[in-house]
Image: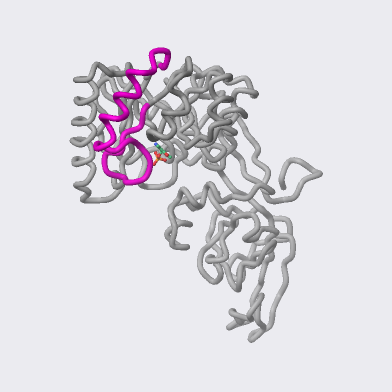
Amino acid sequence: MSGAPDSRPTWADVDVAAFRRNVATITALLPEGARLVAVLKADGYGHGALPLAHACKNRVAMIAVALLEEALVLRRGGIDTPLLVLGPLTAPQVRIAIEERITMGIVGPEELALVRDADAGIHLKLDSGMGRMGVMESELPAVIEMLRGAPRLRVEGIYTHFANADEPGDEYTATQIANYDRMLAALRNAGIDAPMHHLANSGATLRRLVRPGELARVGIALYGPGQSAPTEPVLRWRTAIMRLKELPAGHPVGYGTTWRAARPSRIATLPVGYADGFRRAHSNNGDVLIHGRRAPIVGRVSMDLTTIDVTDIAEAAYGDEVVLLGTQGEGRITAEELATRTGTISYEILTGIGARVPRRHHDS
Ligand SMILES: *Cc1c(COP(=O)(O)O)cnc(C)c1O
């Protein structure tokens, strides 16, 4: 079953070699002189950030995370690749980031005021149309004044973030690029520039919108979420049949008795539930893989348990491996499939895999 006799039979295998191949696949899409920033926020989109960060060594320009805490875990774990915290950061966190030589994404004038007297490296975020973080065009004159009064501050990067780059038929990204270019020109006119510039996320990178010499901040595509990206799935989420029973026709299954056997049925119980991030929206809605074939989820997904109908899979037996996400034989379930089933996005599926699901990293 799990390969670790003392742990629960529900776990996620993380294929570090596949991640490294994905880094190469994405890097190959970049134009002349462009480099990758691997986005490993939210514990590497639920995969466990530290082993993936080690796999990035000498392959990426920087590693980006959202939180200072996430950057510190990587630093303490021996990562010497430059780290960018996307933020936002509080005043005490800014002091720690400076001490630890972690590059800060500075998301507005308030945060710039916290670092202006520091000897520190920053990437300045511009709001090109997301309306969330970043300096607005109307705020640029004030920001330019502040930067002029901050001679020890090093602006090492200037960047922005796209709202719609992964939407089919999107035209807004072109508007955002034009807005960014205009704001960058205004900074340059004021004598402010940076060695690094970055706009693209996964969606824009896959659409080849990265320009020569720029960086690309790529997250989801590095993890192989499904058909939207040309990369391999990195994570495989497995469990096992821990109870297998015959139910007579008419017998209900689970809370709310939402499913009843229409025929004599073999119902298997899996030790995984919504507390593990296997979403309750999968109740009577979705499949798992067993012996390489699909078995439907029946009844409600509960906190710790999920039930499946294996009546049509005669070989199914107590202890058999079940794949919730990933491949098994000819079968394949992607994060995008789980997301479509449950009305969300692959990001939420991957980052939602719970802390009590052990991650086992393999590097073949
Ligand atoms: C999360 C994030 C990314 C990565 O986005 P993907 O769609 O996962 O590639 C890039 N830039 C910023 C600022 C982010 O917050």
Where in the figure is residue 244, as x and y percent of width and height?
72, 67
Q: Is residue 121 left or right of residue 216?
A: right
Q: Residue furthest bottom?
A: 250
Residue at 58%, 83% in the rendered image: 262
Image: 80 above or below 167? above
Q: Is residue 82 left or right of residue 298?
A: left
Quadrant the C terminus occupies: top right
Residue at 64%, 24% in the rendered image: 77
**In the image shown, does 323 or 115 lie closer to the viewer?**
115
Report if residue 327 is visible in the image.
Answer: no
Image: 3 above or below 71? below
Residue at 58%, 31% in the rendered image: 92
Where in the figure is residue 128, as x and y percent of width and height?
27, 39
| Magenta span of residues | 124-153
Where in the figure is residue 34, as x and y percent of width and height?
31, 21
Does the segment drawn in magenta span residue 237? no
